[in-house]
Image: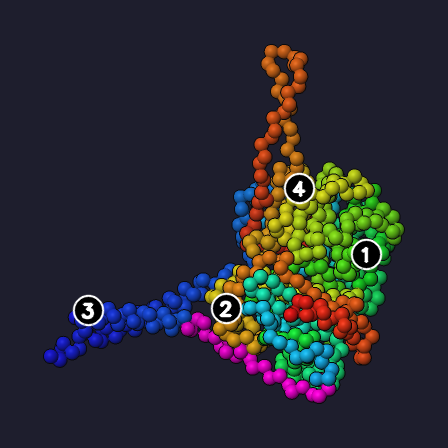
Amino acid sequence: MRASRRRLSPLRTSFLVVLAIVLSAVAGGLAYFMPAAQLALDSTGQVISLPTPSPTALLASPTPSPSPSPVTGAFTVLLLGSDDDSKFSADHVLTQSMILVRVVPATKKVTMLSIPRDLYVHLSPGGYGKIDGAYSYGGAGAAIATVEQDFGVHVDDYIWIGLLGLVKLIDAIGGIDVVTSHPVLDDYYPADIYSRFPYSYQRVAVLGGPQHLDGLHAMQYVRSRHGDLQSDFGRSQRQQEVLTAIRLKAKELSPEDLPSLSGALGGELKTSIGVSRVAQMLPLAASFDNPNQITQLFLLPPYTHGGGPGGSVTADWGAILPLVHQYFP
Amino acid sequence: MISRFALAAVLAAVMVLSGTATFIALGSRTSRVAVPPEKPTSATPRAQALTLPGTLYMSQDGALYSLSVGRFHQLTPEAGWTQPSMTPDGNIVAVKQAPFYSDIYVLNRFGSVVRRVTNNSAPNKNSDPGLNHWAFYPRLSADGKTMWLAYDKPKFQYDVVLSIWAMPATGTIVQGRVWTNAADYTGGDVQPLPVKGGLMYTKYDFASRYAANQPDRLVGMLWFTNRAFSVGRELTSPSEDCRNPAVSPDGTQVAMICTYQKQESYLTIASWNGSTLGPRKTIISNQLVAQPTWAPDGSGIAYLAPGAGAGPFQLWWLPRAAYAPIPSPAPTPSPGGPHNGPVPAPSPATAVVVRPVQVTTNNGFDATSPLAWSG
């Protein structure tokens, strides 16, 4: 009687072995994806807290409050890129890059509108200033609210990435292939990455033509603006070239790459997009394979003019808003 | 019947094995996008490398390599070496790039420094970084007496542009003179290519300066000039957005890269009569092609392009049959005497599609560095 209690039948033994294999395989999978899950929990699904608009903000809004995207499945994301080097405190950084992206999955069309960082606008937290300051005053919520009120668009989500995040992301995907349309020769490029003297300068030379760029050189290519007659506008063009190249490279990634990617990014990426939507969007991104379906918009003159307060750029809203509403209905 | 103790031990072992195996299996399923390129000397080029004539020189990760009879040899350490070109006497002219400046050197064919041509570092390391200079794309004239290069002088504060300079091959840059008037804030004039009767080069400029209907964006154009600081003329239009010129060994054709203001690049060939380019012929349109280089014996064109997907640049080889017209076969005379009747029309040649051959698979050559080829 005692012996039989300590011994199990072959059926129960087999069941236990199978159960052990399944459970341990799941545990192995969880352990593998743990870094990605941690990043997902830390970085995605960020709550957007929109600042309460001041009375002047309502008066200054060029259009009534925007309504959500009418096309089924279409969504608009605000891409924000920031200097987060040691010259700035962590939560008070400027957005050197602001790109409004509208994706229409049904037609596989993507529209990218680069907003000049020096554009003089009414800021959602109150007052007027360059649009790149909105994030430093109130985080992503303030940046989104500023874009919504000034451009009359609805922003569904945002993705913020820091300078080091861009470098690490591009290195983690093995670099990108770009036709560098604008050779970058900058004698006074900020030496604030991997440097003990963040206020010093370095020389950079990114030559023109088709080439493979690692993270550091890709960042130099998109960040420099001294050698560009079009200054921030030229830089916007370069940023869109690199974004397109990242999207092309991302098509070659597999879900198993997520842990190493998340490990590389660390805290350099934040987004309001939830984990489940990220999972839905990965195959969607891979299906956008026609470069002619990508529309790139830049607010060059006559849409904007230089000579604004404090070296800012002033907007011709009468020209900008019809353009924006055409592509971001 | 199995004892509970034995079963517990077996289950523990199974769980450790299964969990570890799952972890390893998932890790092995990652894409290969982030795998760093191998050194050419440790990678094995495909058998097609054996078909390349002469010796080909190229740059990867700051080192110069030669490819001869299917084998790579590392000529220099990884120290910023790039942009090799040949001298008439079989030496190599190359650029050594440091973080703040770059200089031109003459090396022998084994990679040993023969002479330092320029000295572009600022006298004091703590001084204004703008006191340093860049020198790129060195080329020697056919007689070996003149060295052409792209040099960032003159420059004005933030306006750093490369201009084409010429200097005595055995002299110094102080004896040199500027040949082209680079457009401000464009990157300037690069890739000098001495040709019979003058100089071909790539000029970066804004398209809107050349045609009212062109966008206000920067493009590359091939230009030609035959006199120092004269107003040259464009050989390609702004809409073609071309660069990387290479003249065929017989001097009658030019291979170049045209991007048509997009993130694509086309290997394009045009005839060359010494002053103008003929109709364009697109040879490759489905790859991000860079640095086309003619084989010295005219048997084909080598170029750099990603291997698969959007990866690092590999060496490719395009046999002549892929772009040259197939010669019509001569009519065969009938046996038994002179041919008196009408000449029979040659039968149409069978169309054979010749595709480019990927020579390397796991390297990452510098696509901004021209290839140099000695016969």
Answer few, some or many: residues within 10 Å of disc 3's Cα (few below 14, many 20 plus, some between 14 and 19).
Answer: few
Q: Residue at x 66, y 67 (%)?
A: A327
Judge depth for marks 1 and 3 and give the one in front: 1
Q: Residue B212: within the magenta?
A: no
Answer few, some or many: residues within 10 Å of disc 1's Cα (few below 14, many 20 plus, some between 14 and 19).
Answer: few
User: For mark 2, what is the residue?
Assistant: A280
- Provide residue B285's location: percent of width, then percent of height: 63, 48
- Provide residue B312's location: percent of width, then percent of height: 59, 57
Q: Which residues are magenta?
A: A30-57
> In the picture provided, is A311 more to the left or to the right than B291?
right
Q: Please give the label number shown on residue B295.
A: 4
Q: Contact (CB < 8 A) between labels 4 and 2?
A: no
Question: Tag 3: residue type?
Answer: Pro
User: Could you tell me which chain the residue with mark 3 belongs to?
Assistant: A
Element under disc 1: loop
Image quarter where the N terminus of chain B lies is: bottom left
Q: Residue at x 74, y 53 (%)?
A: B239
CA gap between label 1 and label 4 equals: 40 Å
- Provide residue B216's location: percent of width, then percent of height: 77, 61
Same-chain status of marks 2 and 1: no
Report whether residue A189 is seen: no
B53 or B16, nearer to the observer: B16
Same-chain status of marks 2 and 3: yes
